[in-house]
Image (cartoon, rainbow, N blue to C red):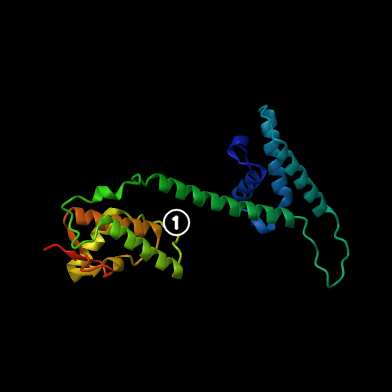
Amino acid sequence: MELDLKINEFEGPLDLLLHLIKESKMDIFDIKIEEITEQYLKYIEQQEKMNLEIDSEYLVLASELIEIKSKMLLPNEKIEDDEIEEDPREELINRLLEYESYKEITKTLKEKEELRHEIYTKAPSNIQDYIEENTEIKSDITLDDLVDAFQKFLERKKENRPLSTKVTEKEITVSSRRHDISLILKRKKKISFFDLFTVFTKEYIVATFLAVLEMAKNKELIITQNEAFDDITCEVRE
């Protein structure tokens, strides 16, 4: 196997060893220790010839590989029938499997991070910006009353199920909730304000609440409460 590798290509000795195993198409559970040790030592020798500094951790693993190789060359000791012969490679295999899992998790997290960088969210805004003097909120209910009722609704919900903080792949936006609410009002004409909150996650709740206020501001719906403590309803504006 020709080696044309540089030390800065790898995150550490296990990363290098895992690469060599995959390149050689070896079964990680049945590493050909003599062959892989030879490849690993060739890599170390190549780096030294290039006058590259070798981290001590690479040298430590090299000595471990040599030790495992020597153990496997020794004749097997006689063991009892009920005993299981210990494989000198076992600890190394477990370390490689653990590192491989770590690499996969890291890769997934990096992909999620890159995806999140492609999503832009607006800064928190004053909800008063969504309300104008001619916004359609009927009866004596005010924006403060609506916010107060909404907060009490959230408190009741928390007793049954806490707000979810799970990261979801689908981004919930004010625009998407406005579209959903418009479709609901086309079918039902009138709906309870609280029935619009069918999913109890932070992103969904905030987007829904701001969508209702924005639609009221744009005269796409009317918020109504006939009397104090009555249900708050949203209805399509004819």
What is the residue that sits farthest to the left in this orientation?
238
**What crowding class fits label 1: few (fewer than 14 Cα within 10 Å), some (14-19), or many (20 or more)?**
few
Where is mark 1, residue-wise? 167
Percent from the top left, x then y, of residue 37? 72, 45
Which quarter of the figure is the N terminus placed in?
top right
Q: Is residue 112 left or right of residue 222?
A: right
Q: 109 and 90: which one is in front?
A: 109
| Residue occupying image coordinates x 18% and y 54% | 135
Q: Is residue 192 above or below residue 132?
A: below
Q: Is residue 47 visible?
A: yes
Who is closer to the viewer here, 169 or 66? 169
For the question of whether residue 6 can be seen, the reply is no
Q: Is residue 46 above or below residue 179?
A: above
**Residue at the bottom extreme of this rendering:** 82
Q: Position of residue 186 (x, y in %)?
A: 17, 67
Amino acid on which disc 1 is placed: Val
Percent coordinates x, y for residue 19 in the rendering: 61, 46
Q: Residue at x 30, y 67 (%)?
A: 194
